[in-house]
Structure formats: structure tokens, C-alpha cells
Image (spheres, helix red, strand yellow):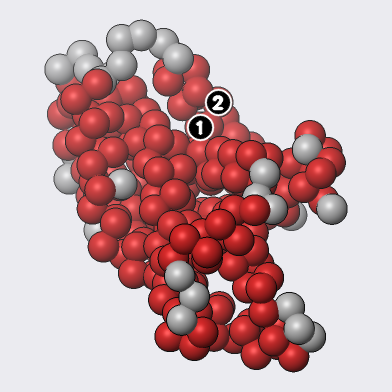
Amino acid sequence: MSNLIEFVGRVSSFGFRVIGDGIRMPLEGSQILNHIIEAGYKSLPLVVPAGFALGTVMTLHTRNTLMTFGAGAMIPTVQALAFFVEIGPLVAGLLLAGRVGSGIGAVLANMRVTEQIDAIESLSIDSFKFLVVPRVLACVVALPLLTLFMDFAGLLGGYLAEYSSSGASFALYVGRAFADLRWANFVAPTLKTAVFGFIIGTVSSYFGYTTNMGATGVGRAATNSVVVSSLLVILADVILVKCIFFAFPENAL
């Protein structure tokens, strides 16, 4: 228990330092942009097919059940609500933790082991602000955008699955999908992924930046980055869902 409390304290201190340096100008604009491209654009080939497949599978699984109860017209609504409110944000966060989190942990750990971070600091450059802050900010910016791509890819996959069964038109499907979707159902769950991005970037950077185990620490930093950030994303999702219900009571209906 004492080790867990100590770990939470170290990561929290690391996160507060990220926030402090993140609001202190100047920022490394070119570095942030490069990492947004790495975390966001290069993750699209993973996120979009995953969203499409989940949307297709979800429609195939729920269609028979809804048709049994005479609620076939609700298929697009169920698909949109499920994806925009919960499935899209959470799955996108977990995918980013797996792809980007491991990369951040491994790269920073390798730089620490090979003394590249020490070399940067010897040039009077703030290695934390130069290496850690841009990666965290990139995750914060990229994850909400990736979530949008996953949501609409899931909606497209659901439509194609429904079209193959009933021949419904795209306009009818989209109209029903967004008929009961309020802005609170869409904006709040998407924005909460910025918190997921902060968790993924901070935890992954922590394991990489603070490693002191030599070459063995590189692999361990990559593994710990994925495992711990994924668990914290799930935990944060539970907390943020309750916060969203409190701020937007209509979401709980």
C-alpha cells in the first residue's frame, strides 16, 4: 500500500509539473505539431477500421434483439448513442494508450538510457519542457479528434450492416441516428477524451522519463505505460461519466 501511495504521489507531481510547464510560454510549437501528427494522423489507420468494425458488429448483434421487440426503427438511435456517448471515447482512448503510450514510454526510456536527455540538459535546454510537455499536449489534442473519426466510422459501419439487411437509405439512417442525440450527448463525452489523452501522455512520459534500469527499463517502460494508462483511462471514464451526469442531468435519462 505504501508503494502504491508513493507511486500515485510521484505521478501526480509529474502531472502537475506538466500542467505548470504547459501553460508557461514559450511552447515548442513545432514539436507539438510533429507529435500531433504522430499520435493523431498516424493512428487513423488503426482507429477508423476499429470503429467501422465495432459499428458493424454492434448492429449485427443488436438488430435481431430490437426486431424481436418491434423496435427496428431504433437501431440507428441505439448505434449513435452507444458510440458517441461511450464506445467511441473509451475504445479510442485504449487504442491510443496501446499505440502511442507504448511508443512514448519506449522512446523516452531509450533516450534516458543512452544519456540523450543528459546531453540535452548539458546544452541548457529544459529537457522536461522540450520532450515531455509536447507529447502530453499532442495526446490531449489528438484524442478528441480521433474519437470523432471513430464515432463516424462506427456509424458508417452500422449503416452498411443495416443496409445489407433492410436496404435503408443513408438519409433515413442518419436522420434517425441523430434524432434523439443532443449536444450534451456528443460534446461532453468527446471532450472527456482530452482528459484521457492527458492521462496517457503523462503516465507514459513518466515511465519513460524517470526510468533508471538501463536497457531493461526500455521494455518495462513501454509495458507499464500501456498497462497503467489503460487502467487509469477506464477508472477516469467511470468518474467522468458521473461528472457528466451531474453537469448534464438529461444524459442520465
User: What residue sits right under mark 2 in the picture?
Assistant: 16
Q: Residue at x 23, y 53 (%)?
A: 42
As drawn, is 130 to the left or to the right of 21? left
Q: Residue at x 55, y 26 (%)?
A: 16
Task: Return the x and y of residue 14 as percentages of the image width and height.
Answer: 51, 32
- Asked where in the image residue 99 lies, by quadrant, the reply is bottom left
The residue pinned by badge 1 equals 14
Label drawn at residue 207: none
Asked if residue 166 is positioned above or below residue 241 in the image, the reply reads: below
Q: Position of residue 177 (x, y in %)?
A: 58, 60
Q: Which is more toward the observer, 12 or 135?
A: 135
- Looking at the image, which residue is at 40% across and 43% down? 145
Q: Residue 3: image x %, image y %?
A: 65, 51
Q: Amino acid at mark 2?
A: Phe
Q: Residue 49's quadrant in the figure?
A: bottom left
- As rendered, which of 67 and 1 lies closer to the eye? 67
| Disc 1 residue crowd, few under 14, some 14–19, many 20+, Cα 10 Å | some
- Please state which of residues 121 and 247 is positioned toward the viewer in this rendering: 247
